[in-house]
Amino acid sequence: MDEKCLPGLYPKDVLSADCPESEKKVHKALKDDLPSNWYAWHSLKIRTKKGKFGEADFLVADPNKGLLIVEVKGGRIRKEKGTWYTYDRELSPSPFKQAHRFKTLLLEVFKEKHIPPPGIGVALCLPDTSFSNQPSQADLKDLVVGENHFPYMDQILPFLMDKIPEFGKSRGGWIKAIHEMWCESWIPEMKLLTRVKAEVEKRMKLDKEQFTTLCSVIDNDRVLVQGGAGTGKTILARELAKKELEEGKRVLLLSFTLALGSSLASEFSEPAVTVTSIGKFAVNLLRGKGIHIKERYEPDFWENITLEAAVEGLSREDKIWDTVIVDEGQDMEENDWGLIEECARDNKRIWVFMDPAQAFWEERKIPESLMKEFVKYKLRKPYRCPSGIQALADGYVGKETDMDCVREAVEDGIVSIIKCEESAVHKRVGEAVNDLLDEGFEENEIAVLSLRGMGFEENIMHRGELGGHAVRKATDLGAEDHIICESFLRFKGLERPAVLVTDLRYVVDKYKVRMNIAVSRAVSVLRIVGAEGEIEKDKMLRGLG
């Protein structure tokens, strides 16, 4: 039996001041003489799925026999010519009719809950009426308890219980079910997922406001949009592409990472738009020209392929796109920009979205000749992440950090710093995943991000499962339905409601940039899991766990 539902009387203490005196008398009698290992509940209210309501004054249960519904009537009670009275006032409906109606509803609730019911009987208790003669009517005989019987309640109750037909029919969870329906205490709580989703909806309304503001420079053909983590750059790039398509323009939307390119591509079906990563785009261009390309997942392959595509992939006669949109522009290297400019030759529109603070390769710059042509626009308001997560992300790129805001997020469960032994980090990540699932998050709302690259053998993304759940890379087929386990870099530009950041102990350089990128992927909640020594090295995380 649930430890919260131990034998005894509920509530254990005296009843509230506004409770009828008659019910207080019964409660005291049960408190004094309820048989050992029995249960009793005062005032159980139920409702069936069809909306029928019912209330019983008391329920008394013998786990080995059955359940007794006790109807209580105060005052001087009598029955004359089939009608019940208290003093001179008629009782309608009759006490036993009330008890039997509750029994019918309770059986209906047990059926709805798929709980085999126990034997259920009814009894009438009259705390202000004494008598020595039981009613002679067959269905009432020996089922009425008067004031003079109260001193013998420990004997009367077993006697009444023996009158229950088919007692012992069920030994299942009916007592626990009754206790849960009765519910002595209710402390309002909201699951973490419910709380954070409500906040996300509020923040997402800012998308339209940001885009409306951005439209102030929409007529310019060369625009550079800069914004920190969480300012909605990718969303704005997508919305710009949609606006250009609505105006009948042919659009090329390029990302740096394959995962982001695939994610953006899934939102477009129009033939007038090409959405992909810069590397995949270069490969497809060359294949379109009949050049056989075998992809290799090596840095030098991707650096050279964009150069080759810029030279061989587009002829002077190709006029394919009116507008070229680039997301994560800070990561494009020199040959990438050569291909981008070739696609936008003859003064086609180029819009670039970038975050200089998330530049992982310091040597990668937008060509100076192109920079001179840009109208520059800055997104100043971050809103994609909760304020505590945003404050943490900002701290990693040298911005003033509101640590009180971060601490408040920790107290609210939005941010958690999980310390453990170095050998147990990946196991603890799995446990944290299960904790999120228990909070109501779905597998497709969780991402686990390593601060190391894909080529590092110890990267957590090389594990096939975490916490007993299969994981996918962001580029895997069907990844949108599973927990994603990725490197921080391959997940750039993407986001999920719940993000776990780990593998801190393997970082050898650019720790702050890696953390800024990874932390800012969390739309709702953030978990950072690391060895205690690594957490203590981070001055912002130190003392938060």
Image: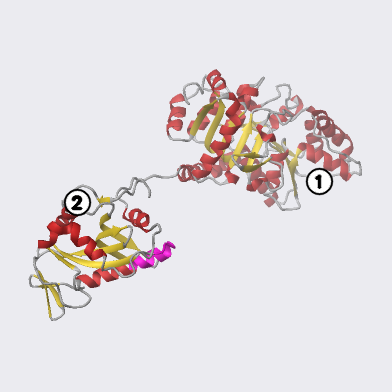
- At a point 87% along the width and 45% down the height, the residue shown is 288
Q: Residue furthest bottom?
A: 81
- Horizontal and vertical percent for residue 26? 17, 57
Name the dominant secondary structure of the magenta segment: helix
Query: What SS does tag 2 mark?
Result: helix
Q: Which stretch appears magenta?
A: 105-116
The Cα atoms of the two marked residues, 1 and 2, are separated by 86 Å
Q: Amino acid at mark 1?
A: Ile
> Observer-nearest residue: 134 or 328?
134
- Residue 346 visible, this orientation: no
- At a point 51% along the width and 28% down the height, the residue shown is 391
Q: Could you classify mark 1 by the number of other residues whose Cα lies within 10 Å: few (under 14), some (14-19), or many (20 or more)?
A: some
Does residue 107 belong to the magenta stretch? yes
| Image position of 399 with respect to 316: above or below | above
Q: Is residue 199 left or right of residue 398?
A: left
Per the image, the residue denoted by label 2 is 31
Per the image, the residue denoted by label 1 is 320
- At a point 42% along the width and 32% down the height, the residue shown is 411
